[in-house]
Amino acid sequence: MKNQFKNRKFAIGGMLILIALIFIARLFYLQIINTSFRLSAQNNVIRYVPQFPARGLIFDRNGKLVVHNEAAYDLMVIPSQLSEFDTLGLCNILATEKKEFIKSLKAARAYSPYIPSTIIKQINPETYAKLQERLYRFPGFYVHTRTLRKYSYNIASHLLGYVGEVNEKDIKRDPYYKLGDYIGKSGIEKSYETDLRGQKGVKMYLVDVHNRIKGPYQNERHDSDPIVGSNLTATFDADLQEYGEQLMLNKIGSIVAIEPATGEILSLVSAPSYKPSLLVGRVRSKNYLMLARDTLKPLFNRALMASYPPGSTFKTINGLIGLQERTLFPSTTYSCNMGYHSRGLTVGCHSHRSPLDLPSAVQISCNAYFCNVFRNILDSGKYTDIHESFDSWRNYLLSFGFGQKISLDLPNELKGFVPKSSYYDRYYGKKGWSSLTIISLAIGQGELGITPIQLANMTAAIANRGHYFSPHIMKEIAGGDDNTESFTKRHDTAIDSIYFNTIIRGMELAVNGQAGSGSTARIARLDSIIVCGKTGTAQNPHGEDHSIFIAFAPKDNPKIAIAVIVENGGFGARYAAPIASLMIEKYLKGKTKNKWVEDYILKTDLIHGKQEK
Amino acid sequence: MVSRRNNVFANLDWLVIVLYLVLISMGVINIFSAEYNETTKNFFDFSLRSGKQMIWISAALILALLLLIIDSRFYLYFATPLYVIMILALMAVLIVGVEINGAKSWFVIGPVRIQPSEFAKVVTGLMLAKYLSGPNIKLQKIKNLIISGVIIFMPAFIILLQPDTGSTLVYFAFIIVLYREGLPGILVAIGIALAILFIFTLLFDKLIIVASLIFLAFIIYFFLEKRKKYFLIGAGVFIISGILIWGVNKVVMDNKIDIYMSLLLTISFSSIIFIILSFAKKIKYIVLILAIMAGAIGFTYSVNYFFYNILEDHQQKRINVVLGIESDPLGSGYNVNQSKIAIGSGGFSGKGYLRGTQTKFNFVPEQSTDFIFCTVGEEWGFIGTTVLILIFVFLLLRLLVMAERQRTPFSRIYGYSVFSIFLFHFTINIGMTIGLVPVIGIPLPFISYGGSSLWAFTILLFIFLRLDASRSEFL
Ligand SMILES: [Zn+2]
């Protein structure tokens, strides 16, 4: 059979020969001509030494250095390169137990004879100096330099977060990381990991049988230098943060302070706290275990992860919704007879003058007044049924950032909880509930879960007369072109700005009203600054109620909005209000004048049962 | 029956079988070394890969024997049903398969894991052979060419969805078969030209590419055109329009147009004049040359688009590393760099069996599978690598000779399929370990660790041996 394409077999065969010749020529080059691959001694190896860049520094909003680095040295071993060595001698230099040392050596060998393993982590500089001179006597060992975090202010552990060794999941998610690398585990260290870490480099060395470095491999042609991590300026004020942590000593709770005009977090305290230096270096795992076992849960970031009913601070919001819905007017008055009474149900109130208009009701925190406000919103007739009116009310809350993660760059925040009408349907049946059933929402109790940061954000929104900027902790990254659009994006609440002045007037009176006029937070008053605030008490079925206070100052052009929660602190005015007031004064004036209030707070110990009355 | 079976074994090409046995033995010896360390007990330890490979080999030999017993006409008659079943199996694995190493390409039945895409090559070869050997099939006919393309690339496309890029690319090997069976030479030439253009596009700036394409067009025209005055007119038109565009850009557009765009504008503007001229004066070639040049410029555009917008980052990186655009010793270049170091450190005679230091454990990932050639290079040196390459060349040439001696187109085409698939694996696998082609994870036939691939290669080869043994029966 004749085939006209028979000659093509020569082209195909020729191609095969050509490929084989190219391969053999290439191998001839790689294996024989290029001597840099074919090392002089038979057993020489190339050692890859990753070069770790220094992590970026962290500054506070005023440029004060908060986090920096110090060098640390890890002793590494490549088991296959070990020869007989003076184990005791090495242990003496390192000041380590021989037994421990042999154990970790075994573990390294079991992991891999050829891959370097860390034998001893973070040798101190003095030991390193001693070891360096004698290392040549211990083939198979070498020292690996990296940096550790160091804190100039030992504060803000929950904001800064900590750095730890990568786990399997991290390595899988991002192949940049290799076993033994470090990664930001929480807080700023986690959120801005890629900026702070910089970029690893690599150096390749030729190493002979005795583990002596013969020199760089191929004239450092394949080496790359590490790129230092970017420095980060955070939004918090280190002095204010430190002061807040002092005030919260021996208490459980949080402080969150925000700059209303920007959403920058000025301070974020979760108490009890821990010193960030506890989670650095060799002591980290031991300390971490200790902190994790502490029944007061110092690792738990209450400012972002604990949710509380907002208590009476929430009356401000219900007042605003009433105004916007036009079911309430600044001059609307309701009377109060020791509480709100309807169809056999009573919401109690304290004794005060009556009747009250809206600003006075905020000033005095009258429960009856806001029960009326709340029911008029839900039963206004504008909506077909309670479901529709309730969900409309709920939408107002969502516009203040409740029920959703609010911070832009703090990990592990919780959403909190704002029920939907369907939530009550499940409890009471579709027709089984009315505005009266959920009346406790009028005064911020009941089925609401608000986190301290959400509460502070709400306060900022009031201070701004109707809008907020999402709270965030990063002010600037050196050389970073980070996408900060979301940082400057203005979120408008569903309340028009004209309605805020009445409520703010009430908050002003709550702090600055005449003695005897029923102001609930006179303890928070400052001489030279108009503080606007609102107390709250979150009912706590498990013990003493939680003391809550929100405030902003000054009244015009506010510079700080703050929320304070002291667990089991009782009434809002008792602890939360003075703490907020001190924080405001500290931030705006740089120091505090009211020494007896400061003393009273500093001496208060709500944890160890020595509660001062 | 007895005489017939004797006949098969008497007619078998024992040379190929010897080469096959040599290769699988070399494979298992090197797999053992890739895993070896002082704690390794012995060769036949079934918890080791070398031990498991011994099991796969035993099974492969039984499989080979069975294939030799089956009547050779079976493959011709059952090519189509087998092909349909294989397509269904490939689709099924997308749905019920198990994902291993990021590709959903495995059936897991109890302790057995099977990768249908490995076997799909065999069936595709049979199907292609059956189709092309049919009456009146000519690859110069566009319809036949398209159907051949569908037969080849339908399984390739399904495998791409798994996604298993390496196994997909293997199907390009069938182009060699088509070439042998009469694929028009011009198509091959265009294919090669495009491949070269593809690489150049990634290597050089687009400005340089376009400038050289224009230059090349003028050179070609200069040699084709007998009346040189037309060439001078052409060059003049180009230069004048260039000056014109340059002037307009400078005066009117404030130099807003960059050099690349100006060049494109110049060539489009002068092209219009060329085309008018060529029709008016009946000048040949110009339109053709212009069309090819425009096509080439368009192609470089789409390559850039494909590369930066369709390929994923790590795929871009791999290509860049091979082309030497990017050096990234700890990233995607890590494997190749380690692999080159390992092979290079073997020197002339190697470090000796089991004495390699670079190819142990994770220094080179995929050591016993895709990068097994490093172990050969490090421990057996240049002698070892050259011998291995020569064995492969010997085997492949033998397959080529055998394919050509077939008396039926079916056997010949299938033989070429076997040859092409082996050639592709051989080229890509060794090429990537010595840094000549991008890292595409496909095994080295008979040497790499892995049951599925060993069985698939065995089946591929032994079906052809069976067809060859009875080559005198078909007449
Ligand atoms: Zn009242």
Image: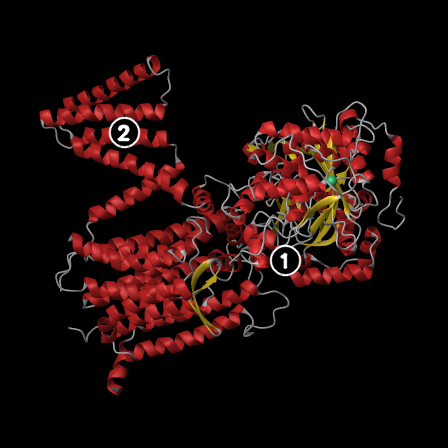
Please state which amino acid type lies under the numbered disc 1: Tyr
Pick the front one: B460 or B96: B96
Q: Nearer the viewer, residue B308 or A458?
A: A458
Q: Please state the horizontal and vertical placement of residue B273, each as a whole percent of the image.
A: 18, 23
**Residue A114 — which label?**
1
* Distance (Cα) linking label 1 and label 2: 55 Å
Give the camera-side residue of A402 and A474. Answer: A402
Q: Quadrant of ligand 1?
A: top right
Residue B463's place in the image compared with B185, above or below, is below
Residue B27 image position (x, y, % from top left): 46, 66
Residue of label 2: B214
In the image, is residue B330 above or below residue A57? below
In the picture, measured across the screen, residue A525 lies left or right of residue A31, that is right
The residue tagged with tag 1: helix, strand or loop?
loop
Residue B346 % position (x, y):
53, 55
Decide: few, some or many residues near mark 2? Use Cα within 10 Å; few <14, some 14-19, many ≥20.
Answer: many
Residue, x 81% and y 62% (percent of image)?
A99
Of the residues shown, which amino acid type is indicated by label 2?
Ile
Q: Is residue B470 above or below residue A481?
A: below
Q: Nearer the viewer, residue B285 or A585?
A: A585
The percent position of residue A598, horizontal first and vertical second, equals 86, 34
Total numbered circles: 2
**Residue B429 placement, left or right of A437:** left
Residue A92 visible, this orientation: yes
Residue A116, by quadrant, is: bottom right
Ligand 1 within 8 angstroms of badge 2 C-beta: no
Colour scheme shown: secondary structure
- Chain on which label 2 sits: B
